[in-house]
Every structure is written in C-alpha cells, then in structure tokens.
Amino acid sequence: MPAQRPNILFITTDQQRGDALGVAGQSWLQTPSLDALARDGYYLTRCYSETPVCVAARTTWMTGQHPWAHGVFGNSRNPMNPENTLPGALTRHGYRTHGAGKFHFTPDQRMLNGFESTVICEEGRMPEGDDYHHWLQTTPWAGLERAHGVGNNDIFAAPSPVPEPHYVSTWTANEAIRFLHQHHATEPERPFYLHCSFTKPHSAYDPPRPYDQLYAPDEVPEPWRNGKDMPESPPQLRRANFEYTWHSLGPEQIALARAFYYGNITHLDHCIGRLLGVLDGLGLREDTVIVFNSDHGDLMGDHNLFFKSNFYEESTHVPLIVWAPEAIRNELDLGPSRRVDSLTSQEQLMPFMLSAAGAELPPDVGTAPPLADVIAGRHPGEPVHGVFGNQENRQLALIEERYKYIWWANGRFEQLFDRQSDPTELTNLADDPAYDDELGRMRATLVEIVRAHGGHAALEGDDLRGSDYDESTTRFGRRNPQPWGRRPY
C-alpha cells in the first residue's frame, strides 16, 4: 500500500473517438490541456471499449469487469452491488467519493452505486429534471438547452443557444471545481475520489460560441469512405444508414457536424484545463492520480455511419491518459513518462485506480493484465475481446496487434481487417481466399476466448452462434418511433 493514499481524479468524456486529440497526430486539433497531460504522463494509444455504448462501457468503468462478467451488453439495465463498484470500494477504503456530470445509471439515474454524493446531468432522461437543468432554471437561460431543436442522437449541427458560462460542460467542470475547493477546506487529510464525467462531445453537436467557429468545415478531415462501404457493410449497418436518414446528408452538413464535434472537444479541453489548474492552485497535483478516458467513440460519417455500437475503430477505440505523481510512479514502478502502444481496455482502469489507492479488489475483478504492468513494459498487453448486443443481434470482436475480426451473429457476417496496411478499415478481407487461414485462426481464437469468459450463449458447439439475417429482430425491424433520441430538454 502506498505510504500515503493518493487522491484520484477520473475524467471522462462521452463519445470521444480515440484519434480526437492533438497528441494523436491531429496537429490541427486544439487540445493543449490533454496533450500536456499525455506528454507528462502515460499516453496509451490503443485503448478499446469492450462494449462501445454508454451504459455498458460505464458499467465496465464502475465494476472493473468484462461485459461477459457484469452482463450488460447495451444501453439496458445495469444492476451493480454498490460495495463492489469503484467508488464503493474507495468509500469503504476511507475515501471521500463524489461524482459530477453524466453517469447514465439505469433504471434510476439518481442511484449512487457507491458514491457518497453526486450532482448529475442526464441529458433529458429524467422527466423531473436533473441538477444541471434545475440550476439553469435559476438563470436567464432557463429552458434553452434544446432551443435549437436538436436531439440527443441527431447529427444536425447547431450552435448552443446557451452561452459558454452556462453550457453543460462548463457547469460540469464548475461542479467538480466546487467539490475540490469544499473538500480542501473541510477534509484536507482525507483522500478523495472525484469522477468528473462530461456529457460531450456526444450529440447534439452544439458547441457554445465561439467554439462553433473554431474549425472551418471545409478544413476538417473528410470521412473515411471507399465508395463501397454500403454494399460491403453488414445488413444492420446498411439499414441504419437509411433508418436514421444519414444517406440523405450532403457533404456540407457532414463537414459541419464534424467541425462542431471537434469544437465541443476543444471546449472540453478548456474545461479540463480549468479543472487541472485548480488542482495545481490548491497544491493537490502531486498527491493525485489522474485518469482520462471516454466511454466510446463516434464514427462521424466514416463508413457512412455516425455514433457507435459497432467495432469499427472510430466507435470502439478511445483515448486513455494516465498521470501519476512521483510517489505512485515509484510505488507501482511505472517508470518515466512515455507513449504506450500496447493494447489496453476499459476493464483495466478500475483495478489500476484501486491498486494506486492501496485498496482491495472486489471479487471477479482483475482478469486482464494489470495496467501498471503494461505501462511499465512488464506485460506486452493482450488482445481485446468485445461483445455488444443481445443473442439474436450479437456482435463479437477480437482485436489483435495487427488484425481485427468482427462477427455479426444476425446474418453470420464476418469482417477481417489488416490494420497495418488498412488502418481506416476500408477493405474487408473476410472473402479474400488469400486470408482464409488468418480468418480461421482468428475465429477459432475468438471461440476459445468467449468460452473462457463464460459467453456460452454466443457459441454453438465449437463455433460462433449465428442465424440467417432477420430484420424483424433488429431495432429497425421493430420500427423504433423516435430513432433520433429527442427529449423534452
């Protein structure tokens, strides 16, 4: 156990793809605060969300378990034992635990799940309003969060009607800063765990001014497309393109959505910079472990798609930065700051933070290699296994250093990508006879991994379970009446 328990600051964003950082090679993208944190800490370039959708990924954050263990494969109910969550374990270990922002617990968004306290923004999921909504009602901007008419899962870009000082990302940072000041004044000897959970850059793509003018749409990189994505995509994704009317979007609208998405990210970076500045001003940086991650990415027009919920790189690859004070670097033998290109996953975050705190791991946690060992180079990392969806419409993925294999149970559709020669995943090699051996090897490896994880529902004998494509079992076959996620506010 460390001689002195460190504070832990867990900063998360919603729907920020792994390449959406300046330090990720996007020199035009302004993320100076996160870039500096990455340079001074450990920048893990190949972190993946095992289930790239909000509730499932957040359950992995909270439990430290692979989805096969915690049982959440989509945006469905996520029952958790509060004592065995990340904040619950730290509360039991003597930490003051607090959350600010979006947590997306279902069915009751106000469940604490181990936190001692939270202030929340749930983007209209609570008919009675959330803490941000109630706060905004006390200002001249009451009721204007959605005055632009854009819903949670719309992709139409519009500047926020709410000015930057009252914008939701600003509010989330302010609430986290408020906690730091209060805790420092009242309980300075007690270590804290603060989860600052931003709702952006998740759509609506509505950055506050002047961040809506930061990137010219015609200068933002265009989506990755090969002209054949639609015919070569799984039938579910072809159907989604029409169900959400993405096929009707012109290049100007897509470029504007991308520009506003990145505008939101730069504003988030500004908010994070303010938060880290307060940490420094209070003299807390050298006593605090900082972890930055996102729950999943956003395709932003790549492969003719938006949002997430599949295992394309832009959906499942997420940013991960770890910063630790010298005492913790020495305690965990992390070594000097560095870029780490080994494969990592969200399952590894909770065990890392608990080990930094000297806290005991709850049961059924820690099956992946310890993140500290991967950071230090003592472990090379291991392939990431992903699972999303129910039995009828399950997707499985195996992500190795070079190859990525994806299985769509509904339709028995296979995808194989060579990320060394095809990093944008535009060429599916599954039907190329030259790759039959590689395809068979990865499929057999995936069967072994799924079986080892207890995912027997995804298997049929010694093979992956599948069926002929049946659109009636998909959300599109059920004719979701409001696929755009519009909410009252």
Image (cartoon, rainbow, N blue to C red):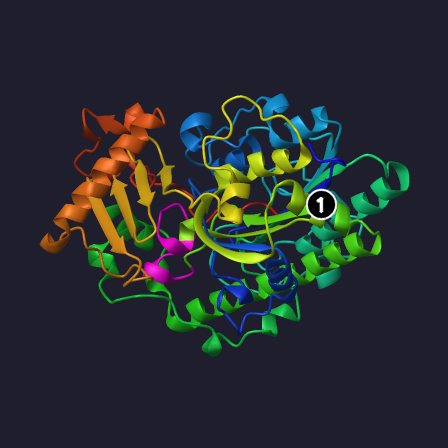
Left or right of 64, for residue 171: right
Residue on which the image places disc 1: 327
Where in the figure is residue 383, as x and y percent of width and height? 36, 43
Dominant secondary-structure state across the stretch colored magenta: loop
The residue lying at 47 percent from left, 27 percent from top is: 70
Where in the figure is residue 243, as x and y percent of width and height? 33, 50
The residue lying at 41 percent from left, 33 percent from top is: 73
402 falls in the magenta region:
no
311 falls in the magenta region:
yes
* Picture layout, residue 449 above or below residue 19: above
Crowd band around label 1 with a 10 angstrom C-alpha radius: few (<14), some (14–19), many (20+): some
Q: Nearer the viewer, residue 185 or 435?
A: 435
Rendering quarter of residue 462: top left
Where in the figure is residue 397, as x and y percent of width and height? 32, 42
The range drawn in magenta is: 300-314
The residue lying at 69 percent from left, 58 percent from top is: 271
Q: Nearer the viewer, residue 217 or 366?
A: 366
Where in the figure is residue 389, as x and y percent of width and height? 36, 35
Considering the numbered disc 1 on the image, is that residue within a helix, a strand or a loop? helix
Instruction: Evaluate whether residue 424 shows in this view.
Output: yes
Left or right of 25, for residue 440: left
Instruction: Evaluate whether residue 112 shows in this view.
Output: no
For badge 1, the amino acid type reads Ala
Left or right of 305, for residue 392: left
